[in-house]
Image: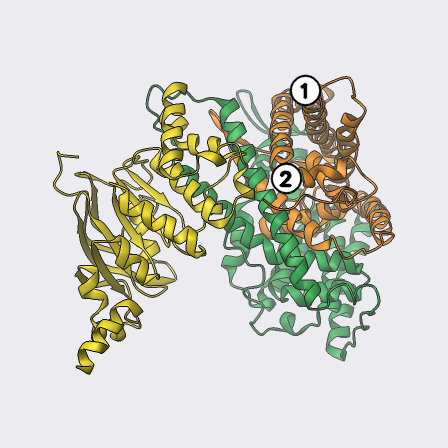
Amino acid sequence: MACCNSALTVSNLCFGYPDQPDVLQSVNLEVKPGDRLGIIGNNGCGKTTLFLLLSGILTPDVGHIELMGQPVVPGQFRPEVGMVFQNPDDQLISASVWEDVAFGLENLGFTPEQIDRRVAEALTLTGTQDLAQRPPHHLSGGEKRMVAIAGVIAMRPQVVIYDEPSANLDLRARRRLICFLQQAPDTMVIASHDLEFVLEVCDRTVLMNDGTLIADAPPRDLLSNTALMQAHGLEVPYSLRTVSTSQSAL
Amino acid sequence: MKLALDEHAGLDSPLHRWAAPYKIVGLGLLMLAFASIRDLRLLLPMLSIAGLVYIASRLPARVLLTRLRYPGLFLVSVIVALPLLSGETVLWQWGWLTLRQEGVQAMGLIVGRFLSILTLSVVLLGTTPFVTLVRAFRSLGLPAILADMLLLTYRYLFDLADTLAQMQQAMRLRGFGRRQRPARVKFSLWRTLNRLAALAGTLLVRSYEQSERVYKAMQLRGYGARLGKGRSDRPQGTAFDWWGVVIALISALSLVIAEALLNWQR
Amino acid sequence: MHIPDGLIPVPVALGGYGLTGLFTWYSLRQINRLPNPTVDIPKASLLTAAFFVASSIHVPVPPTSVHFVLNGLLGAVLGYYAFPAIVIGLFFQAVMFAHGGLTTLGVNAAMMGIPALIAASIFRLHIHLRRLPPKRAIAITAFLAGVVGLGLATLIFVGIVITNIPSGFNAATERAAILGLGLAHGPLMVLEGLFTTMLVLFLQRVKPDMMRDSIYPQLPFGKAPASEPRR
């Protein structure tokens, strides 16, 4: 949207669970409209917690989150942000793909014609129009993922959050997802362990460790920084490693 | 749903050391004796026995209090309804509000029995690891199919509760069931019911499909070859275990005999 | 709707255990007669857990919210495992939430389980409603199964509570209480019936395998036709 120069602003965000304090420690982050932000870091670094805070499910202990210039109030529904869960089975609850994509639109109160149009559009965008009448439970992993995405983008959120989108996908489904995301115009925040995937899809990367942001840079620069990556238990992706080793060999 | 039953089973107390089959018998006898109390004068002895058992178990008071949170509604309705509605002897009257003696007594008995029996149940479950408990039930004659079902149900109960919570969260994120609705969205019971039926159905389908995988994995580790053939071993009790049963039996019998004597006196 | 510890006299509690023991014994005997009695144990256990969890789903009915018992559907889906499943579900309800209790487990299981079995046989009647389109036949019997499952359980519950709550209530108060409970449960029974119907139609569409039991009741989970391949 043209009105805001920042899609998402996180300032001094702190959060802890009762049995696990300091999951997030004063996180500051700004996402501009059109950004494709990748978040990397090992399990338990606070990525999923950050997402639950961004979508207003959890309440921050300290700090402030703004979405399209409006503060995020926990418990309040914000259709401007959409979240694609790590496990698509958690998201698909209807008897057919079509109904599932229509679910959010019905909740937003669209007319049947508008719903028809938007569902068809979302299914076409994600390449799942042939599955419309199938029960989601019988789809393959890749198909489920694309349908879950269709259900979220049908609501036309301004920011889409993806939690491990490439997990459990075969190579073809992964490639299809990459092509889809590369063409998608939305602002997106993607958490992934699949660094090659981040490299192909994102134009900005943030490294998280133990609840703090360590680095913020373009993917190619950050992921090829061997010292930084190793210091936080990560490995430089193979595609970048060959370049750097050949350089060091010279 | 953070309600693991046996999170305090690792503590050490006489009740933790009491071997599970004997503990089931002993506490079971006491519970039945509690359930048979009909005389108000035995209320205090009963509550004291339950209290002593709880103290001896060294379980934190919080455990009992959490268990009491859910049945609270029942307790409140008994406490409010009985004294006002039941009985003829009026204790106190204020306008239409009448406090009746028989109702107050009945209320005291019901709440007292409820609290005492619940306390013993919490002690039984809280001081015994769940697997040990099921094994003990098995040695006391619980059929193998039921024992297997108990263990498997317990194993997946928490998983499925998490799954349901995740799915409900995903639904809320897509705008389902929020309180402030835009004016054009009318609350429709039919539609809500249909959505929740789909949610429940999805949960059932997911668990059904998961069970097929679980069974295959169990089969690969030899499940099905054993059932019904292997007999469970008879429990080997120590003197301590037997003394526990004897003490429980004596307390239970004293309560029952006292109850009978007081009844006969009347 | 559970009978808590301490409300009923010991003979009633023991009688409940006796009845529950009888039904469980009969169910287990039927299961043990199957060619491979272990094959459906994981399925029955996970579905027991799932029904237990699903019955915690609350439906907002302004100004309050209600949840469903689902014992009619449980009877239809689980076949011979239904009664043991209810015993286990109620055991966990008693020890986790103190809904019901250990001394009243027998009474509660009989109160929920016997209506569940009756509701399951009502649901199976859809096979005989040949003149109706199958979907409508299933919808009608599922609705009745839901209504009867909850309705019978409520009747038994009210009966036990009224006969065991100490004397001293005058007849008028008693009748008013029964009438009030009946009136309150009428809408609940209709909701339970509707929800059961919607759930059955969902399962019928998404995973018809699960409902096969109601067509081949002698085989839990309907082994008769080969299940179709996934995808």
Q: Residues within 10 Å of mark 2 (few under 14, many from 20)?
A: many
| Residue B58 horizontal side relative to residue B114, left or right | left
| Residue A89 horizontal side relative to residue B5, left or right | left
The residue pinned by badge 1 equals C179
Residue in front for this viewpoint, A40 or B49: A40
Chain B representation colour? green
Looking at the rendered structure, the kind of residue marked 2 is: Lys
A187 vs B147: above or below: above
Q: Position of residue C152 (x, y in %)?
A: 74, 29
The quarter of the rendered structure image containing the C terminus of chain C is: top right
Q: Position of residue A187 (x, y in %)?
A: 23, 44
Looking at the rendered structure, the secondary structure element under dot 2 is loop
Chain C representation colour? orange
Q: Which chain wears yellow?
A: A
Query: In the rendered image, which quarter is residue A66 located in?
Result: top left
C7 vs C59: above or below: below
B175 vs A194: above or below: above
